[in-house]
Every structure is written in structure tokens, then in C-alpha cells.
Image (cartoon, grey):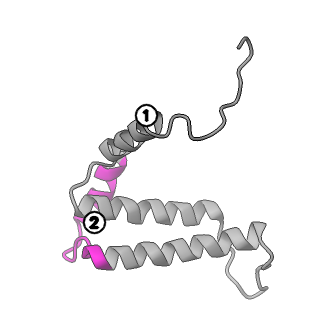
Amino acid sequence: MKQLQEEVDTYISQFKEGYFSPLAMLARMTEELGELAREVNHYYGEKPKKATEEENTIEEELGDMLFVLICFANSLNIDLEEAHNRVMEKFNTRDKNRWTRIETEGE
């Protein structure tokens, strides 16, 4: 994750504008989430794509979301690997018995 954050920072650092403000970043993330939702709806929902609509993929839209998320984290000096580790610790402690586990052979 650190490598991804560094790669995005190197890219953004070449422009005078730099990172957007947190509020603008949130708006951008919301916009990308809407595009992802649209693609998911086309593939798995009841709304087929119009013939005139550009062909995007869920993979592309997830990539856009990841880029904006990394920009957001970088702009606020948040280490996403640390954030991930905290979330996993929470799931593995507080939420460890929340869902039904898949039984493994030999149990």
C-alpha cells in the first residue's frame, strides 16, 4: 500500500495544483462511487446500458475509486496500511463472532 501511496504522490506532486481540498476530494469520491454504482447496476441490476453509453468496467471504476481514496489519504497524511491494520484488528476482536464461520475439515 505504501508503494501505491508513493506512486500517486509522485504523480500529483508534478502539478502546481497539488491535492484537492478534503471537501473537494469527498465530492470527487462520491462522483466516482456513483460511476461504480452505475456500472454494477448495468452488469448485475435491472438497468441495461444504453447503446450510446461508453463501455466502462467495474474494474476501471474500482481503480478510479482507489486512486481518489489514495489521494484523499495522502492529502491528510494518512498511512492507509496503518488504517487497514486498525480496521482488521477491530474485525478480528470486536466483530470476531458477528458472522457465521465456514467450518473447516477436521473440526
Question: Circle 1 — which element?
Answer: helix
Residue at horizontal 39 percent and vertical 36 percent from the top: 89
Determine crowd level at label 1: few under 14, some 14-19, many 20+ residues with C-alpha closer than 10 A: few
- Looking at the rendered image, the disc whose residue lies closer to the viewer, 1 or 2, is 1
- Residue to which mark 1 is pinned: 93
Give percent across and percent down for residue 98: 57, 41
For residue 8, what is the image quadrant?
bottom left
* Quadrant location of the C terminus in the rendered image: top right
User: Which disc, if any, is residue 27?
Assistant: none
Give percent across and percent down for residue 76: 22, 61
Residue at horizontal 24 percent and vertical 76 percent from the top: 21
User: Which disc, if any, is residue 12?
Assistant: 2
* In the displayed structure image, the side of residue 102 where residue 66 appears, left or right: left
* In the displayed structure image, the side of residue 80 where residue 41 appears, left or right: right
Cα distance, mark 1 to mark 2? 37 Å
Kind of residue indicated by mark 2: Ile
Q: Is residue 59 magenta?
A: no
Q: Is residue 10 magenta?
A: yes
Question: What range is drawn magenta here?
Answer: 4-23
For residue 86, what is the image quadrant?
top left
* Quadrant location of the N terminus in the rendered image: top left
* In the displayed structure image, the side of residue 68 where residue 56 appears, left or right: right
Answer above or below: position of 72 versus 92.
below
Residue at horizontal 71 percent and vertical 72 percent from the top: 41
Determine crowd level at label 2: few under 14, some 14-19, many 20+ residues with C-alpha closer than 10 A: some
Seen as rendered, the residue at the extreme top is 106
Kind of residue indicated by mark 1: Thr
Question: Circle 2 — which element?
Answer: helix
